Image (cartoon, rainbow, N blue to C red):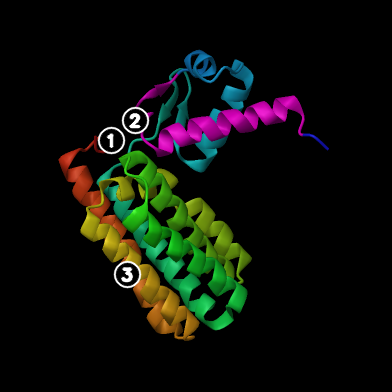
Amino acid sequence: MPEPSSRASARSAYQQIRTAIVEGRYEPGARLVEQRIAEEFSLSRTPVREALRTLDAEGLVRIEPHRGATVRTVEAEDVADLYALRARLEGYAAELAAERHTAEDLGVVDAGIAAFGAALTAGPTDPLERTRALDAANAEIHLGIAAAARHRPLQQLLLRTVDAALVFRSFRGFSPEQSRQSHEFHRLIRDAVAAREPARAGALMAEHILQGRDALLAGLRTDPRGRPPA
């Protein structure tokens, strides 16, 4: 059955606002005025309000009484804590994937790695489009490994822990060499999973996550507001 119009509008508002936050068009600390957003996306205020509440629950937006909604700001301590947790959780997921994966799981991861490599070597020349391609391929790889772990509670924790805006920002700030290092980590992790070497897969994944943390912290030192590079 077709999706009710109110639900479709709320979903559209959510997707458009989330994309604007993730890609840095709405900068950290920016006020999110319902009327202004509704006009920008040709929506009514009700689905915008619902979308902001959902994004507040996800941690991308902060809603305060009498002040309204703002894009969540990012502090160095937040990045360090979040990525330390991600390193543990995704490292464990890689360990389980090495023990439980199927050939189909590896196929999903391989497709993501191929897409990541293509974005590096023959992807879009526009910086934003290139970042989008890298980010989408990266998500396919990491979600594929999490699915291969066959651990639903762990998957749910990862969905709540991985901050899409931070991941996108790290790719936007990566140098070509850092992007190539990320690609090499993906391949090494995949090979450790395929060889059913859980300890090696987990250690590589943790190191890979902490590489992203270091890049983000370096970026925050140059721009404490957490804005994406120009």
Which label belongs to residue 227?
Answer: 1
Whole-number angstrom distance, CA of label 1 to CA of label 2: 6 Å
Residue 178 appears left or right of 123: left
Outermost residue on the front side: it is 122
| Mark 1 in CB contact with mark 2 (< 8 angstroms) | yes
Q: Residues within 10 Å of mark 1 (few under 14, many from 20)?
A: many
Does label 1 or label 2 sit earlier along the sequence?
2
Q: Residue 165, can we see it?
A: yes
Which label belongs to residue 184?
Answer: 3
Does label 2 or label 3 sit earlier along the sequence?
2
The answer to whether residue 144 is above or below residue 166 is below
Taking depth in this image into account, of 164 and 174 the one nearest to the observer is 174
Q: Which residues are magenta?
A: 3-32
Q: Residues within 10 Å of mark 2 (few under 14, many from 20)?
A: some
Relative image position of residue 221 (x, y in whole percent): 17, 44
Relative image position of residue 102 (x, y in whole percent): 61, 78
Taking depth in this image into account, of 40 and 35 the one nearest to the observer is 40
Which quadrant of the structure image shows residue 62? top left
